[in-house]
Image: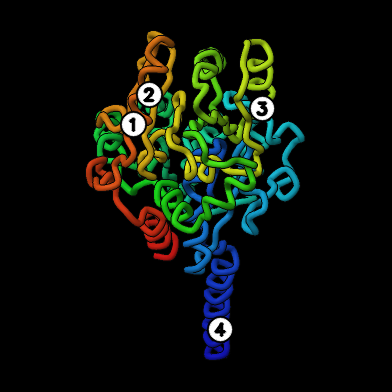
Amino acid sequence: MKKFIKTNYFALFIFGFLEIGCAHFRSTPPRSVAFVLYDAGEAKALEPVFNYLKEHHVPQKIIAIGTARNLVEKNPDFIDIQKSCEVSEKLNSKLGSEESLISYDINKITDCLNPTLVVTGMVSTFQKQLSDAMKQRGVPVWGYYDSFSEDGIKESRSFLPSLAKVLVPSLSIKKAYQKISKAPVEVVGQPTLEEWRDRASKMDARKILEELDLTKSFPVVLYAGGYGKGYAAAFKNFAVEATKLKDCIVLVSLHPKSDGMLEQKILSEVPVSGIRIVPKNISTNEVALISDLVVTYQSSVGVQAVFLGKPVVYFDTKGSTYSDLAIQNHWATQVTTPEKFIPTVREKLKEKVYNNNKDVFAAFGIPKDSAQNIGRLIENRVLE
């Protein structure tokens, strides 16, 4: 009898051990990375990383609101959190960068995603809320800063306490973050730079000219549109001055955030002629390829155009303190007063070949193969 009882106790112990073990494995979620996006810049920068992870069979979940949603919602790994995570109707593509969600919604999203790692942009309150919630659950959060300007670093400071790592595009941005971040900062590059070059090498300039209904009889000046504080004044200054470029074809490409209404309104209010807004189905990258000069306000397009070997002018507003790597390295010219714009354009148009013989990656302290760099880091962390 005693032997029978001992045997049964032993059997119960083994059964209980196996049951607990199986329950543990059943409750352990599949390992995955969740991307949390808001702005167009971070969505475009990380798109090649999505492709890398898919090719290497790394499970990923992409959530996005703001402008980013329009850019990634066709990706098969995109998750519509309003439908899939049953959050409130407030969460949509028009949620402002400073608008927050109630804790109920944040918890629903956190439960729904249940990732091994989070990679987030650092521009919106929504991203900050989700980063904080993930950290509290023990999920490591990596912040990705896609800009080549230090101007946005101050705005991202509130994210730093929740971050396990900060990913940045260049050495100079790393040095700036190291002054304020306790988390390690790693230089990984900026995939859009290589994307611009790769796409340009495959594009047919003649086909782009046909789509724009243009002949290259005059130099093409492209204004890469922007958004945000100060942009309207900057674009108005450009529109007024650009009318003086009678011997140039002047084009305006719209930022992904823009519907073109602001630009159309300004062009209708000033005595402007000969300035065309490019249809949104033709990318800034494509138009830059056939352009002789790229003009922008405070945009990463300036750096991207430098990598295409194009002369670049930043037409800013008076008193601006904006700077980025292209300006700092004197590979682009910044003007802040209208009277200097036309002379600068004339000077730049004389530069038939620009930057083609310079290793801009090395000069800017930017690693090449950035999509693979970021992808491998994520792959190693998720599948370790």
Mark 4 crowd level (few <14, some 14–19, many ≥20, 10 Å Cα): few
Q: Earlier in the sequence, mark 3 or mark 4?
A: 4
Where is mark 2, residue-wise? Answer: 346
Q: Quadrant of the C terminus?
A: bottom left
Residue 25 placement: quadrant: bottom right
Circles 2 and 1 in contact, beta carbons < 8 Å:
yes
Precedes in sequence: disc 3 or disc 1: 3
Is residue 156 depicted above or below 354 in this figure? above
Residue 374 occupies which quadrant of the picture? bottom left
- Do callouts 2 and 3 mark residues in contact (Cβ within 8 Å)? no
Residue position marked by numbered label 3 in the rendering:
260
Question: How far, Cα to Cα, is label 2 from label 1?
Answer: 7 Å
Q: Disc 3 and disc 1: Cα gap in Å?
A: 31 Å
Identify the residue position indicated by label 4 in the image.
11
Relative horizontal placement of residue 145, taking residue 183 as reference (left or right): right
What's the distance in space between the residues labelled 2 and 3, CA to CA? 27 Å
Give percent across and percent down for residue 58: 50, 64
Residue at screen point 62% across, 38% down: 106
Mark 3 or 4, closer to the camera: 3
Nearer the observer: mark 2 or 4; the answer is 2
- Residue 350 — which label? 1
Q: Estimate the x, y position of residue 129 in percent, counting from the top left.
A: 54, 33
Front of the two marks 3 and 1: 1
Q: What's the residue at 43%, 24% (across, down)? A: 155
Q: Secondary structure at mark 1?
A: loop
Question: Looking at the picture, which amino acid does disc 4 mark?
Answer: Ala
**SS under mark 3:** loop
